[in-house]
Image (cartoon, rainbow, N blue to C red):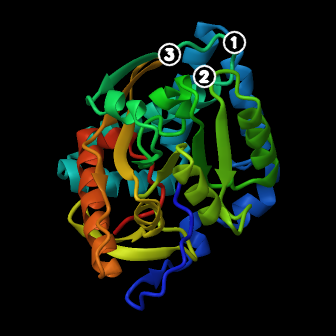
Amino acid sequence: MPSPSTTTPDATLTRAVEIPASARGDTWARRLLGRFHITGTFWLEALMWVTRGSRLRVTSMVWLWSFVFFFLLWRPRRIVTRHLDHILGRAGFVERQRRIFRFFKEHAWCLVERFEQFQPGFQPKVDREGDQWPDLLASDKGFLIVTAHIGMWEIGQLMPVTTGTRRLHVVREREEHEGTQKVVAELLARHPHAPLVTHFLDDDMALGASLLGALRSGDVVCLAADRAKAGMVSMPATCLGHPVQMPAGPVALARAADVLVVPTFVYRVGRRHYRVVAKTPFKVARTADREADLRAAIDRLAGEIDAAIRRDPFQWKRWEPLW
């Protein structure tokens, strides 16, 4: 759920640069394999088949995929190792392999449960950490849930707002394979458990205006703020001890709508068991210095995302090198 691009006149704000094809994984393998590439519809169909099966099928396939990822995905292995070594400290050979396998196994479970949510019988156990929700839901004002690609961040139905009358607008990146995108869009449109309004980046040139209107009407918007995609207005920040570019869209949207920002992260605790962690809400200042207001909010978000990743780095979904 990344951020929408927001136009700004501030000269110091920059546009995120395009990630090289080699870093995106947009290689000959994707073009040659087509639907059989890891982002293609074959694997999506396999996932859906697993989610409709028995507990034995699910568990055995998760372990199988974990070993496949572990032995075959060499480039992701290097990226995962680099990130985990930075956060947890360098490790010897055996411990490094244990970390990599644990990361891929956690990712495999998240993939399966990501699509289990579309099954009619999906009933997760949800723990909520943070006492902000009652006050937020008692107000008729909209608010902005800002998250990161951690754990089960895609499951909007875990947010308390989906049980009330107000609508939850979720902003997502498009899937990399067009066939996969079509299937995912159809699944979200007929979600059996949550009345989500899904917005895909690049589908609506007026996305920012649409989200602003939703917030002003009392709805809730949920998006991710840890990746600045190509073409987005971004601002520099520091995360995990390194300079990064973060999208300015979320904080600019919150400032324009004059609503609270609620940093929220969803961790997978166990089988269909999740913890929704809501941090202290804050407002983006609205002084005469718009750039300074946005920069202060970006710095705060970067600190929240930093802490969220460090809490469980094995659930951080980052497949491009950050440094």
Q: Is residue 100 visible?
A: no
- Find the distance from the CA under tag 3 to the CA under tag 2: 20 Å
Q: Residue 160, image x and y in percent?
A: 46, 27
Q: Which residue in the protein does label 1 denote? A: 53
| Precedes in sequence: disc 1 or disc 3 | 1
The secondary element bearing badge 2 is classed as: helix
The disc labelled 1 sits on which kind of residue?
Gly
Q: Residue at x 60, y 14 (%)?
A: 122
Q: Is residue 119 visible?
A: yes
Choose between 78 and 279: the one closer to the eye.
279
| Precedes in sequence: disc 3 or disc 2 | 2
Q: Which residue in the protein does label 3 denote? A: 124
The disc labelled 2 sits on which kind of residue?
Met
Say if mark 1 contacts mark 2, CB within 8 Å: yes
The residue carrying pointer 3 sits among few (fewer than 14), some (14 to 19) or many (20 or more) residues within 10 Å by Cα, namely: some
Q: Which residue in the protein does label 2 denote? A: 61
Which marked residue is nearer to the observer: mark 1 or mark 3? 3
Choose between 73 and 88: the one closer to the eye.
88
The disc labelled 3 sits on which kind of residue?
Pro
The residue carrying pointer 1 sits among few (fewer than 14), some (14 to 19) or many (20 or more) residues within 10 Å by Cα, namely: few
The secondary element bearing badge 3 is classed as: loop
Compared with 6, 134 (above or below) is: above
Q: Residue 298, image x and y in percent?
A: 31, 66
Quadrant hosting residue 20: bottom right
Say if mark 3 contacts mark 2, CB within 8 Å: no
Q: Residue at x 64, y 36 (%)?
A: 196
Which marked residue is nearer to the observer: mark 3 or mark 2? 3
| Residue that sits furthest to the left in the current view | 89
